[in-house]
Image (cartoon, rainbow, N blue to C red):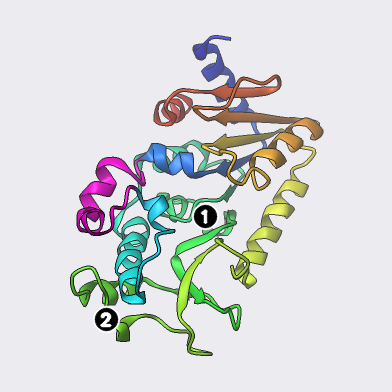
Amino acid sequence: MTEDRKITQAKKLIAEADAIVIGAGSGLSSAAGLTYSGQRFEEHFAPFIKEYGLTDMYSAGFYPFATKEKKWGYWSQHLYLNRYQTGSLPLYQDLYELVADKNYFVITTNVDSQFEKAGFDKEKIFEVQGNYGEFQCSVPCHDGVYTNQATLENLLANRQGLEVRREDIPTCPKCGADMMSRLRVDHRFVEDANWHRQEAAYIAFLQENAAKKSVFLELGVGYNTPTIIKFPFERLNQTLPSASLIRVNLEDLEREGILTFHQDMQEVVRAWKN
């Protein structure tokens, strides 16, 4: 099938859909410009690259900083840049315009709040892996989740060189242990009441629309955590009577029953929208 025919088919499926489920992975944010390496990384982290030999933001997350002050010196900038400093990106805006008047729901492993920034209804977004804008207790002694913008701004404002002041490092208001980013990196990840509420809303959306004409849009989802979006979408595409799966990924092979696009995601989404 030619690319033009695939675009036409995708536009028809989206236009006629009773329900649209967007499943988004890191490839979507990367295609939108929220890259973790290259020019963007070098522009914002040059002193850290020089001092620690960091190569990208992803691997920097695992760097063994010698002290808490140095660790938070890096992480405060990483979190603030990707959650607060970066505004709404055009690709997400195009995606929102594509589905704004449709019956939609979003499940994502991304943690950058780009969906919310673009205008997507917060109640229709299930962020499975957490959010850069939230802290939790590192123990954790309780399941509280805390917005971190003011804390990050304080850390950055008082940072000395590449290190924050020890007294500025956030601690748990309950037990006094250090706080940590609410990201699913290990068993300590807090699934708070809101997380469970959004999970239930996602499941309810799937159930309510199971017999309807549903389109699953899988955008930039790789094989790092395929059991969250990729495999469930494939299963739903096979089992639901009126489901279609549209996949945009530079690396995935063509598969029967899946409308697959390998082009730049910006171009594909704009072609669907126009």
Q: Is residue 242 left or right of residue 78?
A: right
Disc number at residue 165? 2
Magenta residues span: 33-55
Disc number at residue 216? none
Residue 38 counted in the magenta span: yes
Which residue is labeled 1 in the image? 121
Q: Could you tell me which residue is drawn at 73 percent across and 47 percent down?
A: 206
Residue 94 position (above or below residue 148) = above
What is the distance, in whole Å, between disc 1 and disc 2 at their CAs? 38 Å
Residue 82 counted in the magenta span: no
- Where residue 158 sits in the image (x, y, percent)? 21, 77
SS at circle 1: loop
The one nearer the camera, 89 or 146, is 146
Which quadrant is the C terminus positioned in?
top left
- Where residue 198 sits in the image (x, y, percent)? 63, 61
SS at circle 2: loop
- Magenta portion: prevailing SS class: helix
Q: Could you tell me which residue is drawn at 80 percent across and 38 percent down?
A: 211
Nearer the N terminus, badge 1 or badge 2?
1
Q: Is residue 173 left or right of residue 245?
A: left
The one nearer the camera, 272 or 259, is 259
Residue 107 position (above or below residue 185) = above
